[in-house]
Amino acid sequence: MRLQDVIDNAVAEVGRVLLGKEPQIRLALCCLFARGHLLIEDLPGMGKTTLSHALADALGLSYKRVQFTSDLLPADILGVSVYNRNDASFSFHPGPIFTQVLLADEINRTTPRTQSALLEAMAEGQVTVEGETRRLPKPFFVIATQNPIHQSGTYPLPESQLDRFLMRLELGYPHPRAEREMLLRQPGASAQVLGLQQCIDREQLQMIRAAVATVHASDNLLDYLQRLVAYSRQAPEFAVGLSPRGALALLDCARTWAVMGSRGHVVPEDLQMVLPAVAAHRLVPNGDYAGDGQALVTLLQRNVDVIKP
Amino acid sequence: MNAQQQIPRNALVWMIISLFTLAAPHVTRLPVWVLAVYGVAALWRSMVYRGRWSFPGRLVKLALILCACGGIYASYGNMLGLEPTVALLLTAFALKLIELAGRKDAYVLLFLGYFICITEFLFSQDLLIVLYSVLNTTLITTALVALHQPDQHRFNHGSLRLAAVMLAQAFPLMLVLFFLFPRIGPLWSVPIKRHTAKTGVSDVMQPGDISHLSQSDEVAFRAQFQGEIPPRSQLYWRGLVFSRLADGAWRRLRNYEVAPNERRPAPVTTGGEPLRYSVILNPTQQHWLYSLRYAESGQAGVMATADYLLYSPVELEDQYRYHARSWPDAVLEPELSDWRRRTELQLPKGGNPRTRQLALDMRAASASAAAFVGAVLAMFTHQPFVYTLQPPRLGTDPMDRFLFQTRRGFCEHYAYAFVVMMRAAGVPARVVAGYQGGEVNPVNRTVIVHQFDAHAWAEIWLRGRGWVRVDPTAAVAPERIELGLEQAVATEGSFLADSPLSPLRYRGISWLNSLRLRYDALTYQWQSWVVGFNSERQYRVLQKLFGQLDASKLMLILLGSGALVLVPVAGSLLARRRVHPLSPLDHTYLTFCDRLSRLGVVRNPGEGPAAFAERAAQALPHWAPLLQRLTGIYCELAYADANLSPTRSTQLKREFKRGLRRLKRARRPR
């Protein structure tokens, strides 16, 4: 079975529960293949949880979910050592973070202290509790969801921490046709009930990741990428442009996207497909500029030509 | 209002600065309250910027406009002259600042500023004013530049630099336009100068007129001689001849008062080498030109009158330059016509009886007319006559009072008395007014004649010698003729008594004086080369350079010289731009895009090749396979070049070019 078919299969499988969201599913998979973490920002009830759960199922990964609240403490995620009276010692009770896919639901509802504990774990792939460093399982993939910031009672993630998410996705309302299909379903037929099949096993995941490493990015493409980055740093509409980490993230995602399109090289369209998801949350508009990160990405795409000017 | 429309703080500060610098040269002509309006406007606008005050409402604006118009009318008495209109413009300029809200208003204000900058030249075309205008233009341009730099929230000098560079780049073009652009006469003429005062010697002379004029240190004209400058005692600049005495005042003969056959000057036999000189006359709003006797000028627009004067048929509203040749020793009118003799002997009936009697007595005691003249001059020399800038007022029979009582007078008194005595005794005589002497500027060998050099003297007609100049002032105060007015009235201390700051009063300080003379030499150059560069002169210069001119040739010259000065500027700007060499591959791909755009499918900026090919294939289904193939080749060459063998690469490039050729023949679908 070709890698391409494997991936298409997985997309179709997840698409069974999240109807009409194929581009987002592809991007989420891309993020996972590129070893990044995913931030989904949308209103409640748009299928954030469904997507993450379905992804874990389709990849056959262990899955845990933490609902973030304002009184959640770091220990609630990482785990605690508990004194065992029987053998008079402390034993570590791992927290929900010890899983392969972690859904951090409504991450902006909790305090910065807890947020940062999670983000550290995300960055390093390990947690240190009471002096002992414990490695997290591999692959480790965090899907954080957050409500749009203007909702009350939230602690928005600072830019520096937003940067740790490889992609930010917005799911958006479903297409009316997809929504009708969803409404026609039998009551109670949720993702769990549907019981998704595993489509990608561990080995296939490794193969995909190996393929990504061999994808060729030509000089022409790197020029284009650098022009994009340079524009975001120079143009007056941008207060904060793309960091070198942002540029790397763009290239990683574009490579993965090329693999998902079964190509051995990156074309500009790959870059453009992942650009909104990868760049929008890293760009900060200037005070005078009315648009948001999404608008800045549109600006980038429109003003930086693929061919060297 | 969005951020693009707002006026940045930097631009606002520059605007306020240029507002004041623009008004500054007009200060002496403006009523004080206009200056107050400027202060209030600047204060109001900065308070609006700080958010303390608000923009004026509609009613307030209306009230301000009405007050401004009313104020101008109250201050000047009318609304139509040059000064009131300029004052109104300046007031409106300040008021506009108050309601300056968006970028559109700023444009109005700044472009009005350029216009106000020009209004200074209505009053003076001095070199300093020109330099000041350059400063103003720079400031306004700076504000204009700052207006387009939206993120300048603090006052800074960056815009000034850019504006100066831009103006410097425009300078060569300005020179080309100045020298080559045809000087088209105005389409309509506004009599803007009607209301300004006439300056210089007037055509009516009463005792006291010239001494009044001598209070002024303004420059009347500058003359430059070819060759030696005659000694100052010979520099009698004739401007007007007063032949008619009526109501205690001397007047020149109007054209209709001259007998028809006497209106042209009698032919003069000239001999020897003439004095050649050119004169730049400052605007006088009068007709007469000053020249040494006997002068001819071949110049168009300069006429000669029967009393051997040069005359301009139009009032001199601007600086006027003319050339003249003079033969000082030429005999003027050896034969006097009856009409002329009658005119030059005429005296009002009655009046000054003692003077007339004195003249008759002295004439009877003299053997000849020449001896009589000598006797009268000797009377001025030996009797206690005083030459003074502050002559007492004379009532009726002024000469009787002057000769027998006050005996204090300025040149016009002596000329007046002398001519009256001559005429009473039957010697044809007349008063001549003009300037005497002048200051020689050693820097450029010009003679600067000031208003205080104004002078009146006499001419008498003697049989066989024609008109002879006699200066009775020289008999009273020879130092006036030899050294000038300042020396003549030195003991009195009345020289330029009303202008304590005049640089002419500080001629004793040598460095200051040399600075003044240097500046004056510069002014002469400025006037003769720039201000005096009128259409006639422009035409002459162009003809000399390019031969016979016609409209198309002139246009060609203009465009050619414009290109000549702009191309280097454009070239240097282009050279400074960073060059992105286009790879041959990208070049061919762009050719491909070009071909497609001719078929009606234009690649959007930022559209990737594959996405574009997709779109183009949909629009041109007939060509779809070729488009996909070519795009595939390009993508392979541009993005999949890792394992590309050179032979395959060449092959692909060839295929691409073949495809391009096929595409060239494609027609646009209907």
Image (cartoon, helix red, strand yellow):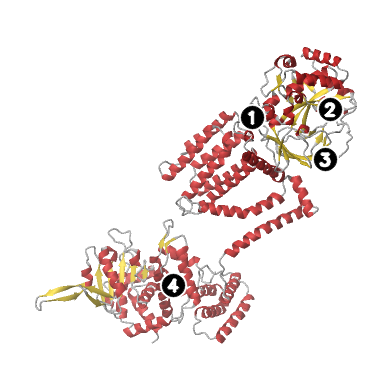
Give amino acid for label 2.
Val
Mark 2 neighbour density, 10 Å: few (under 14) some (14–19) many (20 or more): some
Q: Which residue is mark 2?
A: B468
Mark 1 neighbour density, 10 Å: few (under 14) some (14–19) many (20 or more): some
Q: Secondary structure at mark 3?
A: loop
Identify the residue at image location x=71%, y=58%.
B560
> In this picture, is B258 found above or below B352?
below
> In this picture, is A149 found above or below A124?
above
Give amino acid for label 3.
Gly
Q: Which residue is mark 3?
A: B298
Query: Which mark lies nearer to you, 2 or 3?
Result: 2
Q: Residue B346: tell me if it is visible.
A: no
Q: Which residue is mark 1?
A: B496
Query: Left or right: where does residue B551 sit relative to residue A284?
Result: right
Q: Which mark is residue B131?
A: none
Where residue B512 sits in the image (x, y, percent)? 62, 39
Where residue B670 sits in the image (x, y, percent)? 61, 70
Outermost residue to the left: A86
Query: Which mark lies nearer to you, 4 or 2?
Result: 2
Q: Are marks 3 and 4 on the same chain?
A: no
Mark 3 neighbour density, 10 Å: few (under 14) some (14–19) many (20 or more): few
Name the chain letter of the residue that bears numbered label 4.
A
Q: Secondary structure at mark 1?
A: loop
First along the sequence among labels 3 and 1: 3
Q: Which residue is mark 4?
A: A273
Name the chain letter of the residue that bears numbered label 2.
B
Q: Residue B223: tell me if it is visible.
A: yes
